[in-house]
Image (spheres, coloured by chain):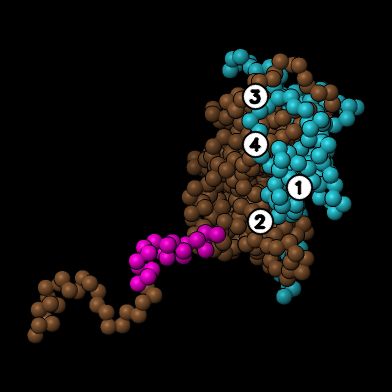
Chain colours: A cyan, B brown
Amino acid sequence: MSVEVDLSGVNGETAPPKLHLLPCEIEHTGPAQVAQYFTPSIRDNGQGVLQASFRGRELRGGTVSLPDGYTGLVLKEKHKAVSDEEARVFHAGQKFQEFTYWNMETPPSRNDALQKAMHWLDISKAIHAPVDRNISQNGSHTRVKLEDSSP
Amino acid sequence: MPPRRGSGEKGRGSGSEEKDQWVVVVPDSVTESQDGGPTFVKLLHPKTEKSGMFLFSKENQQVLEVLAFQEEFRSWFIGESIQQDGSLHMVTPVDPLFLVLPYLVKAYESGMYMPIDQLISDDQYPECTRLLSCINTSDLEHICDVKGSGDVRACRYSEERTLKWLKQKVEQAADKLTDSSVKVTGGAQLLTFTHSLKTEQASRDDYLRYACGLVSDYISADLSKQLTQHMGIKLPEKKEVKCGEPPAKKAKLSSEIPEAAEDYSKFAVKDDKPKNTKMTAAQRALSKVDKTGMKSISSFFSPKTAAKNKK
């Protein structure tokens, strides 16, 4: 099974959508009046922490920018494949560079699972980058030597 | 973004509905090409030996893995809409050598040198042939003995080369962890103290051990064992527990990704506790009592000792 991604719909001209990752599960997928009811409740407390309220609960949040070199996409399958043979296609509709994530009471911090997960984008590079061939032949690693010699 | 209203989708969003929308983060290199997009395919995951979701960039130049960051009770607001599924899919490049390694190891049993395109074929995952165009032929020398030159090259898995290559991977990753000051020692940490404590914690060994855990997510449990031996990394006992039951890719992700390796320390701690918790309330009360001069109740019912006592 393979799924093709159609990037032709990605449009840089329209304003990117506002994404909010909420600390609750909403049993609904579909249109909602976010701009009318949620967005007006967002306040910046001046210390880099955002506050909002949703269904009477206070939320604390922060903006997460994607690291350089990464882009966010919302992929949508417009037509469900009827049979197994039919190729599935995801359409990339909206592009984003940042989103807001919300916690219940705790202000966002580096201890949050999400912030740690964002580290992965960077760290995975080091694991998957091709190894340096020259070092490979020596069988040693210059940097390690330096660090090993220090107490 | 224009609000998606009146599309007749209202009321359709029950939980039972199959997902048709995903929030993903991908490298720019994948989105830049406008004609002919990337393709999601299922491939054999080298660690779990089950299927994993991967993405091939246009014309199979690059292979990327798809990881889902999921927490309980999360949903998205996307513009003027709700998406019930609050997962964030991270698509990051993967070294194709990790993905061909299981095929090479398997073929090694025959002991024969074979052309790479014959080695990488799989009835269960036919898409794996896409990997061939991701791999730089010369890079195969990191994991294979190669015979011949030019177009006629035959390969055979080499454990020695592979371990050397993996060791470099671990060192690369450890360097990165050091630079980005990711916390690799166990336990929770108060943010207030991070600045003062950061510098004196985590030795090079800690970073290497952690990095080794990260790399081990892309190799089989056997190879992971060999790697830790090869590098002389001492893992806390109970490492076997982790190897024995490699968690499914998604399970691993639903917890914090960089934290996974900390399980080692958790295992070690957990092991001591159950002994105490198994005691009943009465046993606990008894353990506090001064027991000098007290006999076990069973001694009163043993005929031999009873007879001796009479004499």
Q: Which residue is mark 4?
A: A25
Q: Amino acid at mark 1?
A: Arg
Q: Is residue B120 above or below residue B272?
A: above
Residue A56 drawn at (x, y percent) = 71, 40
Tags 3 and 1 on a common chain:
no
Q: Quadrant of the C terminus of chain B?
A: bottom left
Tags 4 and 2 on a common chain:
no
Q: Which residue is mark 2?
A: B211
Residue B236 can be seen in this image: yes
* Magenta-colored span: B266-286
Q: Is residue B296 above or below residue B241?
A: below
- Label disc, if present, on residue B81 of the rendered structure: none
Say which of marks 1 and 2 sits in front: 1
Q: Are marks 4 and 2 in contact (CB under 8 Å)?
A: no
- Label disc, if present, on residue A60 of the rendered structure: 1
Residue B151 can be seen in this image: no
Q: Residue at x 84, y 26 (%)?
A: B1
Residue B303 drawn at (x, y percent) = 11, 73
Q: Amino acid at mark 3?
A: Gly
- In terms of sequence position, does the residue under pointer 1 or pointer 4 come before the other? 4
- In terms of sequence position, does the residue under pointer 2 or pointer 3 come before the other? 3
Say which of marks 4 and 2 sits in front: 4
- Label disc, if present, on residue B13 of the rendered structure: 3
Q: Residue at x 61, y 55 (%)?
A: B261
